[in-house]
């Protein structure tokens, strides 16, 4: 397992904060052993939490030209027909994956194809499970067109704790299934919109892994 590049700055700032905090406590409260040990344990816990958040575990990815692979780790919280108002402006099958702070937060391409549309939206930071987060939170919208002509839309949505969405793609790029397309710092969600009638292999509340779990199949 390695540490993702998006974590380098955050981890460095965390280490600096821990160093300053511990130096201050040791200087000001040298005679309060219980307080010093409490801060030591707090510092270790904080460092481990931040470190695990940016972990990048080694994986053997699932591949298949007609397969739709889960774009993120987390839990399936939505499987429903809904109106997609930004790009398709018609009914689509929506699958949403909620990522808690303990999940790996790397986002991966669900299919291979060409990026037909990309847009970043600044916005609010509602809880990621709030239905309004899909249209009001900070988010990105990406549409990748498969070689058979089928467009698939996926959306990064920042959560209540997230304050930065990162993406590595732009319109016109050729993308490969399961390769990284972005990262969301701390709690967040990814929505994916598929043509009606798409075969979905998931169930509500199922725990999935990005780049591994098969979400569905293109017709």
Image: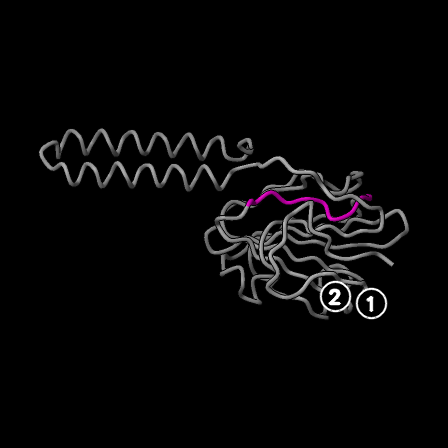
Residue 111 in the image, given as x and y percentages of width and height: 78, 47
Tag 1–tag 2 contact (CB < 8 Å)? yes
Disc 1/disc 2 C-alpha distance (Å) = 8 Å
- What label sits on residue 95 in the rendered view? none
Q: Residues within 10 Å of mark 1 (few under 14, many from 20)?
A: few
**x, y percentage for residue 59?**
65, 38
Residue 74, position in %: x, y?
A: 58, 54
Tell me: residue 97, above or below residue 34: below
| Residue 106 among those drawn in magenta | yes
From the viewer's side, name the closer residue of 18 and 38.
38
Q: Most extreme residue toward the right, as rendered?
A: 148
Q: In percent of the image, x 57 and y 66: which residue is there?
A: 132
206 versus 122 height, above or below: below
Query: Horizontally, is 122 left or right of 216 in the view?
Result: left
The residue under the point 80% across, 48% down is 116
Q: Which mark is residue 197?
A: 1
Residue 161 placement, left or right of 57 = left
Give the quarter of the figure containing the N terminus: top right
Q: Which residues are magenta?
A: 104-114
The secondary element bearing badge 1 is classed as: loop
From the top left corner, tell me how far across and down residue 3 is, in percent: 53, 32
Q: Which quadrant of the view contains residue 83? A: bottom right
Residue 45 position by quadrant: top left
User: Which residue is under mark 2?
Assistant: 93
**Residue at image location 78% in from the left, 48% down from the top:** 144
Q: Quadrant of residue 25?
A: top left
Tag 2 secondary structure = strand
Give the answer, above or below, for where 70 lies relative to 181: below
First reached walking from the N terminus: tag 1 or tag 2: 2
Residue 210 included in the magenta stretch of the image? no
């Amino acid at each position: 397992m390695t540490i993702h590049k998006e974590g380098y700055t955050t981890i460095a700032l965390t280490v600096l904060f821990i160093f300053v905090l511990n130096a201050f406590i040791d200087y000001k409260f040298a005679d309060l052993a219980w307080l010093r040990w409490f801060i030591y344990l707090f510092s270790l816990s904080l460092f481990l939490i931040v470190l695990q958040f940016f972990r990048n575990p080694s994986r053997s990815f699932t591949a298949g030209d007609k397969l739709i692979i889960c774009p993120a780790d987390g839990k399936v919280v939505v499987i429903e027909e809904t109106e997609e108002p930004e790009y398709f402006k018609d009914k689509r099958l929506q699958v949403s994956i909620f990522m808690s702070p303990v999940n790996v937060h790397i986002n991966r391409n669900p299919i291979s194809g060409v990026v037909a549309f990309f847009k970043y939206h600044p916005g609010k930071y509602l809880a990621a499970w709030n239905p309004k987060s899909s249209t009001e939170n900070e988010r990105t919208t990406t549409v990748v067109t498969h070689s058979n002509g089928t467009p698939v839309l996926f959306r990064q949505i920042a959560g209540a704790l997230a304050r930065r969405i990162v993406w590595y793609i732009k319109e016109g790029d050729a993308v490969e299934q399961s390769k990284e397309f972005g990262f969301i710092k701390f709690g967040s969600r990814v929505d994916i919109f598929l043509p009606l009638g798409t075969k979905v292999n998931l169930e509500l509340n199922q725990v999935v892994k990005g780049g591994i779990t098969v979400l569905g199949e293109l017709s």
